[in-house]
Image: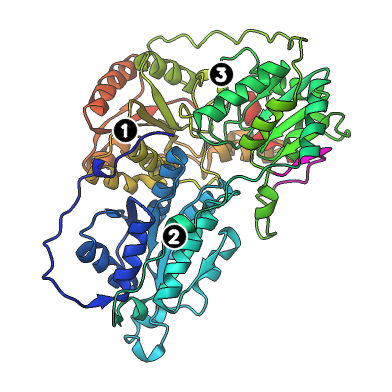
Amino acid sequence: MTKHSAASVPRDVPIPSTPDTTVWCSDAIADMLRALEIPFVLLNPGASFRGLHDSIVNHLGNEKPQMILVLHEEHAVAIAHGYTKVVGKPLAAILHSNVGLMHGSMAIFDAWVDRVPVIILGATGPVDAAKRRPWIDWIHTAQDQAALVRPFIKWDNQPASIGAAQEALLRANQIATTAPQGPVYVCFDAALQESKLSEAPPMPNPLRYLAPPPAQPADAQVRRAAELLSNARRPVILAGRVNRDTLAWKQRIELAEMLNAEVLTDMKIGCAFPTAHPLHAAPSGHFLNPTSREVLRAADVVLSLDWLDLAGTLKQAWENEPVASQVIQVSVDHYNHNGWSMDHQGLPPVDVFLASEPEPAVELLLQHVKKRNTPAPLRAPLPAPAVIKPGPMTVPVLAGTLRRAVGNQKVCLMRLPLSWSGDLWDFEHPLDFLGYDGGGGIGSGPGMSIGSALALKGTDRLPISVIGDGDYLMGSNALWTAANAKIPMLLVVCNNRSFFNDELHQERMARQRSRPVENRWIGQRIANPEPDLAMMARSQGLTAFGPIEDCAEFERTVTEAIALVKGGATVVIDAIVQTGYSPSMTAGLTRSD
């Protein structure tokens, strides 16, 4: 985890209120948010929660929690999501009525699939029809508002009293932070917020309502798994969804070294194992590459540490043949599956199932496994980095230039684009790379990057995001929040002026149907005119450069940008890159089997 400070964001200080003994229901709700130690609430204002808004400002003084304003509800949830990926503790996002919830629903789905806790607060009503204003209160009131997002949240509630509201917030925090973690939703009746109380209600102690400690797997299953791993001919560890804790990071390394087990990682989730370690068997990616496929297929025992899409990964290695390896699965993800979304992926074959999070399972396995003296197979050396020379940029050249400009500084790569491959940058710490967004919700990159940079503010890490142009264009007005809240970070846009992912899909269709491949760009290219991405950032108060097409100019610019970020600026660079993905990414995106 990283240290963070709620004082790191400039606070709008309200004029003190005249002392008054009146107690409003929304004041009690605000008090509970403070008791839960939520440092920030992200919001785009709305009348449905005007009572709670007033209480945060005039009852709490806009402090603990402090408001951070966003220009779109989706960004409120995305920023909270990005923040929690760094610190492991949830923020709150407040969404106005049914319309705000619909705006924020894509980001909620991202947090759900990414298994990240976010406390989403909403409002409706007044539920009592006699108290509704004509027109607007009616269209912003729903009979069951949470039904809009219930398939991809862990829990929801619409409390009808202050006692119930306090309990709902305590339960929401408890459920969100219990593995498998995820978003929760609490909806407050507008009329309830604006009601008076005869006296301040008693405040429950939040420390008595925390999430339970991580579950531990059954002893017999741990011993069986340890026996398989200790006696394996060629064990492989799939290091999947794990936390950012440095002790757990060291224990995963220790387990791999005890077993001389090869390790594979995944670019869709945060880094789980040092990629320069001799046991890291192949560059990570969004799909298996030829080397990682060979490594997995040769394994006789596979240990999955909550690997994302275990069934699909095994299928990539064995295709239509039975999986020949003994498979040990460590996960509690099955507790989340509800059937609406297919984010649970395929059903994998499992020989030993440890129903726990990876961290306690690894700690227990270390107590039972025997050291294997058989060394892991030597891996082939990685290809030499792309030669950096003046001229048009590719993503590998951009990555090499950025890496050289960073030097020995500690970096957190908060987001990387689909065109990035795992051999472009080595990760040596759990905060070196935070992974993707979970649900593939294009437009999440700017908001999530801002949230992660907020959590990193005041640390010794340089926050950098490299995102695609489509992601930037869909989420670019999140950048105003970074400027307003003075959140330093560097955002590099890999701008190929195309929705290139779908160019590959259209190429596949054309080849399959014997039609002109040359037409794949139609309906995909972001051109005629080309949006001025740097100007979009400057118009919101950020420093921005570009478009930059020459790699020598990019190198000069990124060096200047890093200095500006270290001085507290939020900087955007529009870098024009040639289209292209790594071979494994291209094959994975377009395969239909």
Q: What element carries label 2?
A: strand
Q: Residue 120 carries which label?
A: 2
Seen from the viewer's position, the closer of residues 352 and 102 is 352
Q: Which residue is drawn at 52% across and 38% down?
A: 436
Q: Looking at numbered disc 3 in the image, what kind of residue is underneath it?
A: Asp
Q: Is the magenta stretch mostly helix, strand or loop?
A: loop
Q: Residue at x 33, y 40 (%)?
A: 454
Is 8 on the left-hand or right-hand side of 174? left
Q: Residue 489 carries which label?
A: 1
Q: Residue at x 62, y 27 (%)?
A: 265
Check if mark 1's residue and mark 3's residue have beta carbons within 8 Å. Answer: no
Instruction: Give the extent of the magenta segment.
Output: 345-355
Q: Which residue is drawn at 35% across and 15% down?
A: 405
Seen from the viewer's position, the closer of residues 76 and 38 is 38
User: Is 586 in the magenta?
Assistant: no
Specify which label sits upstream in the sequence, 1 or 2: 2
Q: Is mark 3 on a helix, strand or loop?
A: helix
User: Is 349 in the magenta?
Assistant: yes
Check if mark 1's residue and mark 2's residue have beta carbons within 8 Å. Answer: no
Res 493 seen here: no
Distance, label 3 to label 2, CA atoms, is 37 Å
Q: Is mark 1 on a helix, strand or loop?
A: strand
Crowding around mark 1 (Cα neighbors within 10 Å: few <14, some 14 to 19, many 20+) is many
Question: Compared to 66, does 47 lie above or below?
Answer: below
Rendered location of residue 217, percent (x, y): 72, 42
Question: Compared to 351, does 68 lie above or below?
Answer: below
